[in-house]
Amino acid sequence: MKRIIIFASGSGTNAENIIKYFHKRKIAEVTHVFSNNLRAKVLKRAHDLKVKALHFDKEAFYVTNDVLNILKDAKPDIIVLAGFLWIFPKKIIEAFPDKVINIHPALLPKYGGKGMYGRHVHEAVVRNKEKESGITIHYVNENYDEGAIIFQAKTVVNEEDSAEDVANAIHLLEYKHFPVVIEKVLGLRDKV
């Protein structure tokens, strides 16, 4: 069975969706959820779903090899960033080449980079009167939102849509496509 590790910083609705998806499919499992935020709801969601939930700080992530060593011991087939807000360290990316992916709530290269996450992205999309938005799933490199694109899905943005309307449409795309794309990257499915 393929092993998935998720990194998240917030609520964890995507993490929960992925855990439940693979629990039903029985072809892969989420073994751990890591968070840099001790108060993140994702930790409770993981715990409730009987997945190991771990919190770490900047020192364990960037300075020491604490997080890296746990990852090496866990032997993930893929590391999934689902609303994870810190830049991923080069040492982890190099230890798991082509095994770290991220989801971004916009059609990259638009609305990517430091500070562009969650509502900040959706507010910018509405403010700039974009006609569409969407999701991008991409490989992670040492720069925010610059890794090779794996998959994109679009949604229409109407003139009267608020940032919250856009966020809701994006969440639906995330829930529908992210687990399927993970499955494809793991080699468990031919097409998305």
Image (spheres, grey):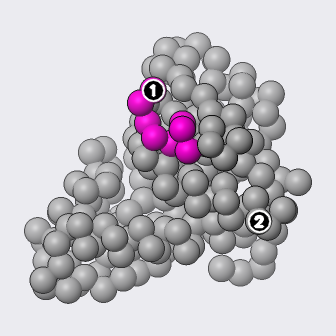
Q: Is residue 104 magenta?
A: no
Q: Residue 167 vs residue 150: left or right?
A: left
Where is residue 159 drawn, in percent x and y?
Answer: 13, 85
Which of the numbered marks, if any, corresponds to residue 131? Answer: none
In the picture, the quarter occupied by the C terminus is: bottom right
Disc 2 crowd, CA 10 A, few/some/many (<14, 14-19, 20+): few
The local secondary structure at tag 1 comes to loop
> What residue sits right under mark 2 in the picture?
24
> What residue sits right under mark 1 in the picture?
38
Residue sitting farthest toward the right = 1
State which region is magenta.
38-45
- Foreground residue among 121 and 107: 121
Where is residue 115 drawn, in percent x and y?
Answer: 27, 45
Residue 138 in view of the camera: no
The local secondary structure at tag 2 comes to helix
Mark 1 or mark 2: name the one nearer the start of the chain. Answer: 2
In the picture, the quarter occupied by the N terminus is: bottom right
Report the amino acid beneath label 1. Answer: Leu
Q: Residue 86 vs residue 72: left or right?
A: left
Establish if 61 lies above or below 146: above
Where is residue 64 drawn, in percent x and y?
Answer: 58, 13
Disc 1 crowd, CA 10 A, few/some/many (<14, 14-19, 20+): some
Where is residue 119 drawn, in percent x and y?
Answer: 25, 56
Q: Main secondary structure of the magenta part?
A: helix
The picture quadrant where one finds residue 86 is top left
